[in-house]
Amino acid sequence: MNQPFRIRPAEAEDIPGIGEILVETWRHAFRGIIDGAYLDGMTEQDQAMRHARRMGAAGVSYQAAVDADGLVGFANYGPARGTVSDGIMELYALYIRPQAQGAGVGRMLIKAVARDCLSRGATGLFAWVLAENPNRGFYERLGATVTAKSMVRVGNRDYEQLAYLWSDLPQLADI
């Protein structure tokens, strides 16, 4: 990764890179946690098509982290799915290329997401995170707290997931 990186709203041209980053980070973070056949069966094209559809959905936004070589990470967020308090938005995805992790990219993406959510009148933000996700401490370091647990099916197996909530969006926007 070449420094410096910058954060900007993602564009349709970023979609292939978003698919690539998602597959790369899942295989890196979840190998040994999620079934290997499922991870190996993921394709960048399928993920790009999924995100191309999502990018066009009402209220859904993307932030991109780029450096001189191109896309190094992205965040996807929008209206909360399921039953949550009014004013709470959902972070659907936050993925950073493994070689760019630890450089502040995730923090800057979350800050951009929080600022955009505030501009839409949101008061909080939450994200579902696999309980076995080796990177979930990132959310805790940024002040999120676990407020719920549920199960999610990935492939042919159920996994526990945790809902991390940032209830003070202005504070998150100033990290």
Image (cartoon, helix red, strand yellow):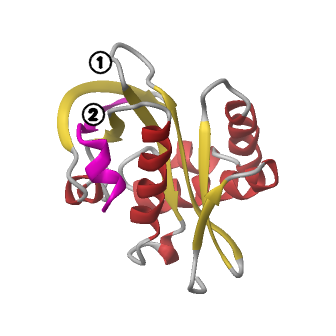
Taking 2 as reference, is 88 above or below it?
A: above
| Residue that badge 1 annotates | 85
- Furthest-right residue in view? 13
33 left or right of 52? left
144 left or right of 110? left
Q: How many marks?
A: 2
Residue 31: x and y, percent?
Answer: 43, 57
Does 61 lie within the magenta span? Answer: no
The answer to whether one can see residue 157 in this image is no
Q: Which residues are magenta?
A: 158-175
Residue 69: x and y, percent?
Answer: 71, 79
Residue closer to the observer: 88 or 2: 88
Taking 68 as reference, is 26 above or below it?
A: above
Residue 27: x and y, percent?
Answer: 51, 57
| Mark with earlier residue (1, 2) | 1
- Furthest-top residue in view? 83
Residue closer to the observer: 113 or 91: 113
State which quadrant residue 127 falls in.
Answer: top left
Q: Secondary structure at mark 2?
A: strand
Taking 78 as reference, is 71 above or below it?
A: below
